[in-house]
Image: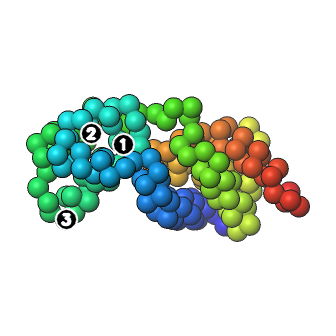
C-alpha cells in the first residue's frame, strides 16, 4: 500500500469512527438545552463555544445542517459563522488534551493497525521519510483539526495501546 493510499484509508477509518460516534458524543456531552440555545439563546451558546470544544463542534455542525436545510440563521449565528470563516474564531483545545479518552486512543491505534495489516509499516525511525501508518494517521488528524496530530503523540498512543493487545507485535 502506498502512503497516499494509506492516507485515504485512514480518512475513511477515522471518518467512520467519528460519524458512528458523533451521536453518542453529542448525547453524552451536550443535552437538549444546547439545541434549544442554538435557536433561542445563540449568544449564550457562542459564549460557551469559546471555552468548550464540544460546544464549538456542535455549533459548527448545527450551523452546517441549518445551511444545508436552507433554514434561516439567527444574526448572532451568522456573525459567529463569518468570524469562524475569517479565521477569528479558533476551536478551543480540549482540557487535558484528550478528545474522548480511551475510545479515541483505541480508534487511533486500530487505524494504525489496520494500515499495517494492509501493508504499511506502522512506525519509522527519526531519519526516515514520513511514510509510515502513524504518519498517515497524523496527516488525517491534522487535516480534520483533531488532536493529537503529531507523529510523536500518535506514536506514543500506538505503542501504549498495542501493549494491551494479546499476541500482537
Q: Residue at x 65, y 44 (%)?
A: 154
Q: Residue at x 32, y 34 (%)?
A: 48
Viewer-nearest residue: 9 or 73: 73
Horizontal and vertical percent position of residue 121:
74, 57
Q: Which mark is residue 69?
A: 3
Of helix, strand and loop, which one carries label 1?
A: helix
Q: Which residue is mark 1?
A: 55
Query: Quadrant where the N terminus lies?
Result: bottom right
Residue 108 visible in the displayed image? no
Alpha carbon of mark 3 to alpha carbon of mark 1: how far?
21 Å
Q: Do the CB atoms of the residues marked 1 and 2 lie less than 8 Å apart?
A: yes
Q: Is residue 110 above or below residue 34?
A: below
Horizontal and vertical percent position of residue 28:
47, 51
71 relative to 37 in the view: left or right: left
Viewer-nearest residue: 93 or 118: 93
Of helix, strand and loop, which one carries label 2?
A: helix
Alpha carbon of mark 1 to alpha carbon of mark 2: how far?
7 Å
Q: Residue at x 22, y 63 (%)?
A: 68
Horizontal and vertical percent position of residue 126:
74, 37
Judged by depth in the image, the label closer to the viewer, 2 or 3, is 2
- For disc 2, the neighbor class at 10 Å (few under 14, some 14 to 19, many from 20) is many
* Residue 160 occupies quadrant: top right
Viewer-nearest residue: 92 or 36: 36
Earlier in the chain: of badge 2 and badge 3, it is 2
Earlier in the chain: of badge 3 and badge 1, it is 1
Earlier in the chain: of badge 1 and badge 2, it is 2
Q: Which residue is mark 2?
A: 45
Amino acid at each position: 500500500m502506498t502512503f497516499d493510499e494509506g492516507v485515504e484509508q485512514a480518512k475513511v477509518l477515522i471518518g467512520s469512527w467519528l460519524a458512528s460516534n458523533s451521536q453518542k458524543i453529542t448525547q453524552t456531552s451536550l443535552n437538549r438545552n444546547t439545541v434549544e440555545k442554538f435557536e433561542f439563546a445563540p449568544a449564550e451558546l457562542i459564549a460557551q463555544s469559546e471555552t468548550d470544544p464540544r460546544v464549538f463542534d456542535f455549533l459548527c455542525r448545527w450551523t452546517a445542517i441549518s445551511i444545508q436545510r436552507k433554514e434561516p440563521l439567527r444574526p448572532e449565528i451568522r456573525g459567529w459563522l463569518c468570524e469562524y470563516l475569517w479565521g477569528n474564531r479558533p476551536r478551543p483545545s480540549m482540557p487535558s488534551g484528550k478528545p474522548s479518552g480511551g475510545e479515541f486512543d483505541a480508534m487511533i491505534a486500530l487505524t494504525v493497525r489496520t494500515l499495517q495489516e494492509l501493508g504499511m509499516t506502522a512506525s519509522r525511525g527519526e531519519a526516515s521519510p514520513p511514510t509510515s501508518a502513524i504518519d498517515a494517521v497524523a496527516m488525517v488528524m491534522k487535516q480534520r483539526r483533531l488532536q493529537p496530530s503529531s507523529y510523536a503523540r500518535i506514536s506514543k498512543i500506538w505503542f501504549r495501546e498495542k501493549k494491551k493487545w494479546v499476541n500482537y507485535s
